[in-house]
Amino acid sequence: MRDGETKAEAGRGHLKLVGAGLPGHHALSCRNLTYRAGGRPLIDGISLDLVRGGITAVIGYNGAGKSLLLRLLHGLIRPSSGEILWHGEALSPAHRKLQAMVFQKPVLLRRNALDNVVFALASHGIHDRERAEDALFRVGLADAAGRAARLLSGGEQQRLMLAMALARAPQLLFLDEATASLDPASIQAIEEIVLDAVAAGTKVVMVTHDLGQAKRLAGEVVFIDRGRKAEAAPTDSFFNNPRSAVAQAYLEGRLPHQFQIHRSQA
């Protein structure tokens, strides 16, 4: 983070347009990424270049394929076709160790908060209790280290999930609606943690239905419609002048059945 720059500006200011950038500047790329199930494409020929640094918000209607896209990019699901590249190389298990993902619903062990972070580190070959303690401190849960994870509030559990992810110092962090259903104070706390991570050099790709959050945090928006990339643009440009009809309808709050748009227009 540069002198005089706010955390939000750090999150927004270091991002280039999808498809831009020089070779080697991309943290993660995909080419013609497709995933089929039941004979139909759920992700349909998406190509993206996620440039190092900053925050990319992935938005779209329910069922558009946003969460599935993140799982594919993280290597949790094998695509039907297409390729995923990590700094220009085919995504491998070794590359996945440089990434982390936090889901909407916390997945925690029936142990205390500290032991959850210790276990998360150990599962990646890192045996460092002090590092786990530091991760809890960074997310404001140092005083909750000995508390059972299942007894933490929803916001605290999500911060614990962030501690487990960030303890490994990932180069790329995926967030799948990580603040959904949380109270405003918890959302603000998590956003601060995310911005701190970005300021420290972590690239963040987040699925969110909170358009205010996308405006606050992201430097770029990727809009997914029916499994395809309908639009990708800097945040201000997307919200002020969306190029696709489907994105404009979405921002106006119209539901899919309230308009007729051919895929060629999206």
Image (spheres, rainbow, N blue to C red):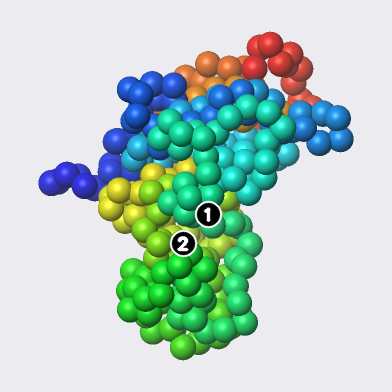
CA distance separating discs 2 and 1 = 7 Å
The residue lying at 86 percent from left, 35 percent from top is: 38
Figure disc tally: 2
Q: Where's the C terminus, which quadrant?
A: top right
- Secondary structure found at label 2: helix
Tag 2–tag 1 contact (CB < 8 Å): yes
Residue 103 screen position, x and y as percent = 59, 57
Q: Position of residue 25 (x, y in %)?
A: 34, 30
Circle 2 packing at 10 Å, graded few (<14), some (14-19), many (20+), is many
Q: Identify the amino acid type marked 1.
A: Met
Numbered tag placed on residue 240 in the rendering: none
Closer-to-camera residue (28/62): 28
Secondary structure, mark 1, is: strand
In this view, 206 is above or below 25 = below
Position of residue 230 in the picture relative to residue 240 (left or right):
right
Q: What residue is at 43 percent from the left and 47 percent from the top?
A: 172
Query: Residue 13 placed where, x, y %?
Result: 29, 36
The answer to which quarter of the image holds residue 185 is: bottom left
x and y percentages locating residue 225 in the rendered image: 66, 28
Reading the image, the residue beneath label 1 is: 101
Residue type at mark 2: give it.
Answer: Ala
- Asked whether residue 189 is in view, the answer is no
Nearer to the camera, 209 or 231: 231
Q: Quadrant of residue 190?
A: bottom left
**Visible residue check, residue 20:** yes
Q: Quadrant of residue 248?
A: top right
**Residue highlighted by disc 2:** 165
Furthest toward the right, the residue is 38
